[in-house]
């Protein structure tokens, strides 16, 4: 039986459920992730859209053109402002979950395997040992 993970925003108004395991665990250092997290990078777990479910609430959506030049739709809680997940036109069957919203030990369980937009990473941030490094967005997997 596949593992089930749950997540929520800071105030609990939005709750999600994920089945199975993420297909990719990544740190993103793009300018947009700097802004949307208020920090130096975003820790993202990418799940199949078919394994993602909103259990409670409805997020607000902010649409913008990403650093890769493609539209993205950022979902966040309209009450507490917590960034929750992103949908991308490049990966329409995937959901980019902001790792910090997950419970059940998922944040500790899934180490980043990839770092993207490393050309924008501050020099004082070390690379994750063993993670593939990409100066920009890596090529899209052919199976997607």
Image (spheres, rainbow, N blue to C red):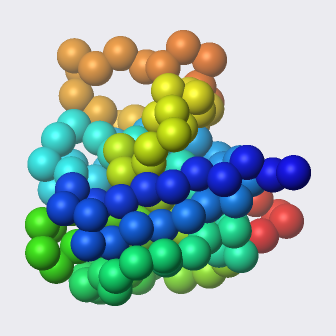
Residue 8 x/y as whole percent: 36, 60
Horizontal side of residue 23 vs 8, given as left or right: right
Q: Where does residue 136 sit, x and y in percent of width and height?
A: 46, 49
- Which residue: 22% across, 37% down? 40
- Name the side, left or right, on which 100 lies relative to 31: right
Q: Nearer the viewer, residue 42 or 75?
A: 75
Q: Residue at x 28, y 54 (%)?
A: 33
Q: Residue at x 81, y 52 (%)?
A: 2
Q: Residue 26 location in percent, x, y? A: 52, 42
Q: Is residue 83 visible?
A: no
- Residue 48 location, quadrant: bottom right
State whether residue 130 appears in this view: yes
Q: Between residues 71 and 53, which one lies in front from this camera angle? A: 53
Q: Residue at x 12, y 75 (%)?
A: 79
Query: Depth check: 91 or 81 in front?
Result: 81
Question: Which of the 4 quarters of the picture holds residue 118?
Answer: top left
Q: In terms of image quadrants, where is residue 17?
A: bottom right
Residue 69 image offset from top left, x and y in percent: 40, 74
């Amino acid at each position: 039986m596949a593992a089930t993970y749950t997540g929520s925003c800071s105030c609990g108004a939005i709750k999600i459920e994920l089945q199975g395991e993420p297909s990719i665990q990544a740190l993103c250092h793009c300018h947009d992730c700097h802004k949307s997290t208020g920090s130096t990078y975003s820790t993202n777990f990418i799940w199949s859209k078919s394994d993602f479910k909103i259990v409670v609430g409805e997020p607000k959506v902010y649409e913008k053109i990403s650093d890769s030049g493609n539209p993205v739709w950022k979902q966040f809680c309209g009450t507490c402002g917590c960034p929750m997940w992103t949908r991308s036109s490049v990966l329409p069957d995937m959901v980019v979950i902001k790792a910090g919203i997950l419970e059940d030990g998922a944040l500790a369980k899934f180490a980043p395997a990839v770092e993207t937009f490393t050309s924008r990473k501050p020099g004082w941030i070390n690379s994750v040992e063993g993670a593939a490094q990409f100066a920009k967005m890596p090529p899209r997997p052919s199976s997607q």
